Amino acid sequence: MRRPPPSRSARRPAPSRLRAAPGRRSGADRRRSAGRAVLACSALVLWAGAADAHPHVFVTAREQVLFDADGRVTGVRADWTFDDMYSSFVTQGLGTPGELLTRDQLAPLAKTNVESLAEFGYFTVAKLSGHALEFGAPVDYWLDESPDKLVTLHFTLPLKAPAKPAPALNVSVYDPTYFVDFRMADRDPVALVAAPSGCSTSVIKPRPLDASDNQKLSEAFFANMSPGQDFGIKLASKVMVACP
């Protein structure tokens, strides 16, 4: 897994001066909460203040679409590799210097991550014929550290009700607030597991932002973003799964 370009990981936010009104979370507070759900470490709290520009965290994603014996999709398995800056922060003070962290050492953090991500729908949306499908609680989750010192979160999201991907099932992984930038891996971004013969998959990448949207990539814009505003969808890749 290649590291993200320096321009993505080198941004460092300035201390925040934003405050939420009593009883109401501002856009900045929602981003802080979302970031803590993904990172679950004190380092992110420092990142969550006003910054030069969004995003703050970068994830390279691979997704596996799981099928049962009846040709129905039963869930999605996610493998999210975090950028080098986050990986460095999250491993500080853990384990023995010079040695890779084990699953056991990272298990408490993995549990916190997947439990906290529930509030944000695991940043994963699955749709069939335009209707959103519901996921259950994640299973089979863990964190690991690779030899290049990047940390990857693995987890499976089971569908509450298995569904036949006809005519097509769409899966998108993104953060609506664009605090976290999810990018599908360049190599092997999607796999079909136990899929019937004839099933296929493709990845539709987002269009580049226009000049107007690029100008919005500032903390002032995101701090004042209304609840439910979905900027991140503009930058989300879409996984298409089709079966005969």
Image: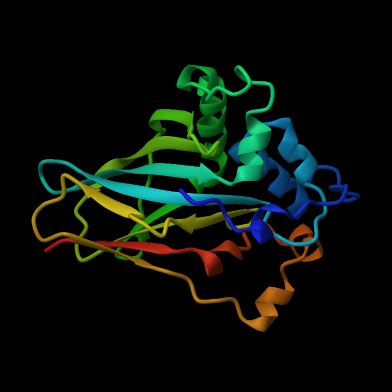
Where is residue 218, by image quadrant?
A: bottom right
Question: 221 left or right of 145?
Answer: right
Q: Which image quarter: residue 44?
A: top right
Looking at the picture, tell me which residue is in the foreground, 51 or 119: 51
Residue at the extreme right of the image, as rendered:
17
Q: Is residue 20 left or right of residue 179?
A: right
Q: Position of residue 124 (x, y in %)?
A: 45, 50
Name of the residue lying farthest toward the bottom: 211
The quadrant where residue 38 appears? top right
- Residue 20, given in percent of the width and then of the height, sits at 84, 47
The correct choice, above or below, for 97 with respect to 11 in the image is above
What residue is rendered at 75% in x and 62% in y? Answer: 53
Residue at figure coordinates x 68%, y 31% from the top left: 41
Q: Nearer the viewer, residue 82 or 24?
A: 82
Is any part of residue 26 visible from this angle?
no
Nearer the observer, 79 or 4: 4
Task: Reply above or below: 102 against 218.
Answer: above
Give coordinates of residue 82: x percent, y percent: 55, 44
- Direction from residue 137 to residue 68 in the image, left or right: left
Image spot of residue 73 (x, y percent)? 23, 48
The total number of labels drawn is 0
Work out which quarter of the rendered image holds the C terminus and state it. Answer: bottom left
State the residue at coordinates (72%, 53%). Answer: 10
In this rendering, does residue 219 appear at all? yes
Question: Residue at the location (41% across, 35% down)?
Answer: 155
